[in-house]
Structure formats: structure tokens, C-alpha cells
Image (cartoon, rainbow, N blue to C red):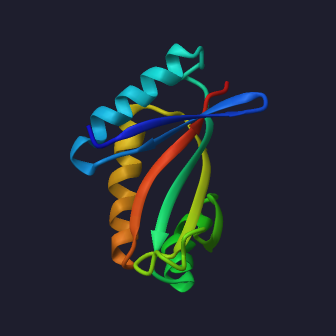
Amino acid sequence: MNWRKLLFWRKPRVVVVATYDPKERREGDLRIIEQIARDGADMSQPREVVHFFFMPTAEAAHRATDSLLMEGYRIEVAKTADSDRNTVNPWMALVRNEAIVSIDAVDSFYERFTALARSFGGQYSGWEADGRP
């Protein structure tokens, strides 16, 4: 498979990250959601979800996320760590919100955010979710 699941241990929580080949996206997302539930999370409760957009310019990153800011998402825009080598999309926008994580919600995020990023010349690269509550 071309997707991977990464667990980052942070005090005192586990954060699960989903990155994937778009052709296998849904299968990878289902596995991530199942892992969060297996780790004891109450999936009926909202948790922080972070979405990753990679954009060609800072202006494109801000323009792509302006509508999300108006909806209450929290946005951080910065150059990527490899911006000197990544000349296609050297800017990253971290888009944060509180949401109940389910496959339907992830499908909706994916469709919406992929279209949004593409409309400004960028790429939606996936999401991560807090392992709590």
C-alpha cells in the first residue's frame, strides 16, 4: 500500500496521522479511525483535527483558507521545512478544527479540501486527529 499510518507520542496524548495515495485513501482512513477507537477513544466526542494543505505561495495558502477562517477553523501558514527543495508547493497551511471523526466526516473533508487546494494550485495532503477523548 502507498498510504501509511504514523503514531506520534505527545505528552499525554497520542496523535494519529493519515497520509495516503488518493487511490487507497478511504481504506487508509478507515484503518486510522479504527485504530483511534481501538486505543480507547470515545468516537462520539469531538476532537482536534488538523488538515495539511501544501500551496505554491503564501498568498495562495491564505486565499485557499480564508473561507475556512470565516467558518471558525484555526489557520497557520508557514514555509515548509524543505521549501528550498520543494519548489512546487513550498508553503503549508495547517487548518485546525474540532470535529467528530467518522468515515463520513473524513470523506467530506477530503472532497472539499482537495477541491479547495486545487483551485489555488495546491494539494490537500491529509489529516491528523487527537487520540483523545
Residue in view at x 40 percent, y 41 percent: 106
Q: Where is residue 21 in the image (x, y as percent from the top left)?
A: 28, 48
User: As drawn, is 76 to the left or to the right of 99?
Assistant: right
24 sits left or right of 132 in the view: left
The answer to whether residue 69 is above or below residue 108 is below
Of the pair 83 and 60, the residue shown nearer to us: 83
Residue 105: give x, y in percent of width and height: 42, 40
Q: Quadrant of the C terminus?
A: top right
* Residue at figure coordinates x 57%, y 16% from the top left: 39
Q: In which quarter of the image is residue 66?
A: bottom right
Q: Is residue 120 left or right of residue 9?
A: left
Total numbered labels placed on residues in the image = 0
Q: Nearer the viewer, residue 46 or 21?
A: 21
Q: Depth check: give the residue in front, 87 or 96.
A: 87
Vertical comparison of 2 with 122: above or below? above
Question: Which residue is most to the right?
Answer: 11
